[in-house]
């Protein structure tokens, strides 16, 4: 797959895939987007003592390393991430994400990419990682996730990742009070999440509230 490294508006880099005409993150700011949507609106809302997180699309590992940084502050996190097309290490190095992080956190970034796939790895005492190389559309997902970071390519680029069947499957695999977050606020996605069973909120996006995002909650009484 041909890919290019590009800078985004907050100075952090992202990947552009010309064949899909799609970026891995918002060009308005990759770091700003990840921190706002997944950490602030997702993880910070979760009250589980040891959150079990499911990420769709490991990609560059940016959401994973920001979650590790949080785990070092709040305690143990179990992080499962799905990826169909793992990136080559030489591309990941060119993103310079270590320069956005404090020295200790940065030292873990290459490790996230180097550890083997498909088994649990203790990256730190507080951050357990399991990267699964798979296709979400055919995966049978185990149950019990407290937070889902839904970071697939956009619906118009990858429609098979934004179907009622997928959202039903994700709803089923969440624990009571589970929190689902995504950068996509399209009405059709909101309605599919509601049909799956989530209570859905539209929230302010990362850039002065522009480009809203969606958060779904699974009821606590099941
Ligand atoms: C928007 S990018 C993810 C960005 C990533 N969270 C990050 O911080 O870099 C979407 C990701 O989903 C992955 N992907 C595409 N199709 C997939 C599938 N069917 N199953 C699992 N992952 C898939 C892509 O390879 C890509 O890494």
Image (cartoon, rainbow, N blue to C red):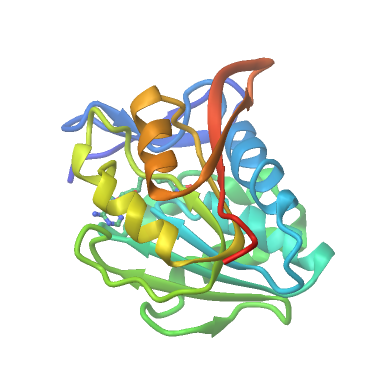
131 is higher (above) or lower (below) than 137 = below
Q: Is residue 193 left or right of residue 211?
A: left
Residue drawn at 21 percent across, 37 percent down: 159
Q: Position of residue 203 (x, y in %)?
A: 63, 27
Q: How many marks?
A: 0
Nearer to me, 57 or 216: 216
Q: Position of residue 213 (x, y in %)?
A: 54, 29
175 is higher (above) or lower (below) than 91 = below
**Residue 53 occupies which quadrant of the picture?**
bottom right
Nearer to me, 8 or 75: 75
**Residue 33 occupies which quadrant of the picture?**
top right
- Of all residues, the one furthest to the right in this rendering is 73
Q: Is residue 83 left or right of residue 55?
A: left
Q: Can see residue 182?
A: yes
Q: Can see residue 30?
A: no
Residue drawn at 66 percent across, 36 percent down: 36
Q: Is residue 26 left or right of residue 179?
A: left
Residue drawn at 50 percent across, 34 percent down: 13
Residue drawn at 42 percent across, 71 percent down: 131
Q: Position of residue 181 (x, y in %)?
A: 54, 44
Q: Position of residue 184 (x, y in %)?
A: 44, 31
Nearer to me, 76 or 10: 76
Nearer to me, 155 or 48: 48
Query: Quadrant location of the C terminus?
Result: bottom right
């Amino acid at each position: 797959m041909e890919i290019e490294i590009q800078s985004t508006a907050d100075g952090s880099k992202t990947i552009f895939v010309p064949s899909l005409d799609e970026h891995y993150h918002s060009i308005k700011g990759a770091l700003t987007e990840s921190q706002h949507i997944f950490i602030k609106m997702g993880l910070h809302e979760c009250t589980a003592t040891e959150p079990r997180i499911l990420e769709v699309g490991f990609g560059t590992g940016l959401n994973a390393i920001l979650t590790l940084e949080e785990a070092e502050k709040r305690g143990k996190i179990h992080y499962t991430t799905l990826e169909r097309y793992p990136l080559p290490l030489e591309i990941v190095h060119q993103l310079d994400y270590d320069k956005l992080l404090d020295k200790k956190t940065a030292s873990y970034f290459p490790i996230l990419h180097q550890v083997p796939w498909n088994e649990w790895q203790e990256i730190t005492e507080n951050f357990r990682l399991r990267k699964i190389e798979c296709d979400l559309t055919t995966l049978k997902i185990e149950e019990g996730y407290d937070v889902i970071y839904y970071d697939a390519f956009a619906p118009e680029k990858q429609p098979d990742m934004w179907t009622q069947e997928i959202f039903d499957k994700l709803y089923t695999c969440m624990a009571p009070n589970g929190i689902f977050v995504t950068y996509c606020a399209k009405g059709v996605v909101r309605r599919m999440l509601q049909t799956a069973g989530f209570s859905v909120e539209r929230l302010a996006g990362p850039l002065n509230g522009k480009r809203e995002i969606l958060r779904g909650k699974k009821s606590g009484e099941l």
